[in-house]
Amino acid sequence: MSFPVSRTPQTADLHPLMPLYLVIFIAMIGYSMMVTLFVPMLMHPHGFLDESATHSTRTIYVGILLALYPLGQFIGSPVIGSFSDRYGRKRVLSITLVITIFFYVIITYSLQIHSLWLLMGACFLAGLSESNVAISQSAIADASTPEDRGRLFAYLYATMSLGYIAGPLIGGQLALHYGFATPFWIVVGLLVITYIWILVGFKDTFAPDTTKPVDYFKSFTNLTNVFTDLPIRRVYLVNFLLFLSVYGFWRVVQIYMVDKWNFDVGQVTFYYAYLAVTAGIANTFLFAPLSKRLGLRGLIISSAIVGGVFMLAIVVPSSETSYWFTAGSASLILAMTVAGCGAYLSTLIGPERQGRVLGNNLAIQVGAESLSALLGGFLAALLIPLPLIVYGAIAVVGGLLLITYKGKANICE
């Protein structure tokens, strides 16, 4: 039985991969604007909820709304990742970009007419189509050497961080002066540019086995491998816990800011961009040298435990100034945890499984992200600091659990 062979160069060249990083960058811009704009939009009276809605009701709706986009990605990621293994990265990526553009138009329209229910449906369907982030990750893994994989994945998460900086800062200012819909029209335009660049500037990084029959049902049930793939099942579990903790932190910390200091849209987006800057610094300058020194597994363990402790420390001081140190340090350290999760898992599998396994991993990531937003909203309805306490503890537990794993690179080939 023959397997498709990835076109792996002797040295990884960034130039052919730039369209892939752009796909990830635009996806992060769009979602970071949802995360930062939708929280004050619903927490304050802006016409999407009745003015008589209670504080706890508003936090619950925030959790539900923020959960829908990653829920769509959770469902779509293993399917789209599997399809890209069968039909090639470029073809599937191009189709999903067209669908994503359409649903971002619907998101923008729903914001213009202040329809919360239409916005919820559009966010879910946009997340479903924008599961193509898994394809970009797989294509980057295809084109990387084992020695360069940590560096290229660090760039990947640095790109995500840049999206999380640009989205809140630019989107926040546009929303303040021109309304919540305006920044999402900008995303629509950027998606069109990205689609054109993929068509004309991206050459597929993977040669699929076109003679192999497609099992569509298996594609939809591909996520069950998370429970049955014994050699890497423990890593899937650790990744889920760490994704739940880290993305939960980045979702609920805004609820904490709005409640404790009554921040408006401009302040929330500014402080969130600050967290994104710390994450970008970590992934651009710290991740690569630390991963070489500690190894990917060692870096994940240490950053998860230390980052979890800083997350717990956020709720202790009452000063707004202390937030710069506690939340900033937590974001900087935990960003390396997230970057390490995908890169470490990628080293444990062969090239023919990169799309499926990384698709599963992205599904776990966005599933945990969706759950963290939903759970965070309900926990905050009980007690505003409670989500940060819970997610800090989970980060520590995830780091400790990985200590017991003794996997080796390419054990699943």
Image (cartoon, rainbow, N blue to C red):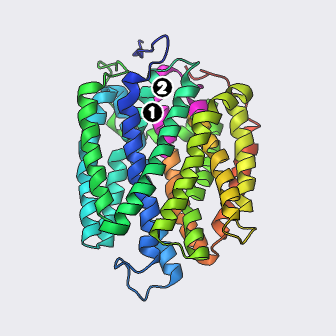
Q: Is residue 377 magenta?
A: no
- Residue visible at 40% across and 86% down in the picture: 51
Q: Are marks 2 and 1 in contact (CB under 8 Å)?
A: yes
Q: Which residue is mark 2?
A: 141
Under mark 1, the amino acid is Gln
- Residue visible at 52% across and 39% down in the picture: 157
Cα distance in 3D space between marks 2 and 1: 6 Å
Q: Is residue 372 above or below residue 86?
A: below
| Quadrant in the picture for the N terminus | top left
The image position of residue 188, as x and y in percent, is 26, 50
Q: Residues within 10 Å of mark 1 (few under 14, many from 20)?
A: many
Q: Which residue is mark 1?
A: 137
Q: Identify the element where label 2 is drawn.
A: helix
| Quadrant in the picture for the C terminus | top right
Q: Which mark is residue 159?
A: none
Q: Which residues are magenta?
A: 343-363
In the displayed structure, does residue 181 sit left or right of residue 64? left
